[in-house]
Image (cartoon, rainbow, N blue to C red):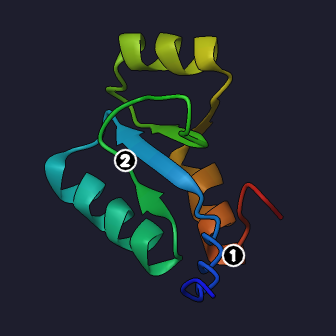
Amino acid sequence: TGPTLKPRPKKQWQTAVLFTGFSTRRRGELEALADSAGWSVRVSVGSTLDYLVTGTNGGLSKVAKAEALGVTVIDEDTFLALASSGATRES
């Protein structure tokens, strides 16, 4: 008989978020909040991104790319409400 293969653990879903248009300090605070809520913080817009959170100086090219990929673009207040409620893209 051959070797016994152990089942691979199922990958757990994480909501992916990217912040743009915030001061370095505020972005760090928001990223820490996202991380503590179990979200994955990204550094670029891609097809696996769930939310692009825009501040007052949000990059127009990031917003355009996100919209083209079907990523949900939200403001800081919406992010705070989602993160504090424990909402995820899957729920």
The foreground one among 66 and 77 is 66
Q: Real-space Cα distance between discs 1 and 2?
A: 18 Å
Q: Residue at x 50, y 10 (%)?
A: 64
Percent x, y for residue 73? Answer: 60, 31
- The kind of residue tagged 2 is Arg
Local packing at callout 2 (Cα closer than 10 Å; few below 14, some 14-19, many 20+) is some
Q: Is residue 78 left or right of residue 16?
A: right
Q: Is residue 91 left or right of residue 73?
A: right
Q: How many marks?
A: 2
**x, y percentage for residue 38?**
52, 75
Name above or below for residue 74 compared with residue 35.
above
Q: Taking 72 as reference, is 50 above or below it?
A: below
- Callout 1 environment at 10 Å: few (<14), some (14 to 19), or many (20+)? few
Using the image, tell me which numbered label, if any, was put on residue 37.
Answer: none
The secondary element bearing badge 1 is classed as loop
**Residue bearing the label numbered 2:** 42
Query: Relative to residue 26, is residue 5 drawn left or right?
Result: right
In front of the other: 13 or 11: 11
- N-terminal label among 1 and 2: 2
- Going by the numbered disc 1, the residue's amino acid type is Gly
Q: Position of residue 37 (x, y in %)?
A: 53, 77
What's the residue at 20%, 45% (across, down)? 23
Front-most of 78 and 8? 8
Residue 8: percent from the left, percent from the top?
A: 59, 78
The image quarter containing residue 40 is bottom left
Residue marked by disc 1: 86
Q: Is residue 29 above or below residue 3?
A: above
Q: Residue at x 38, y 43 (%)?
A: 19
Q: Is residue 64 above or below residue 20?
A: above
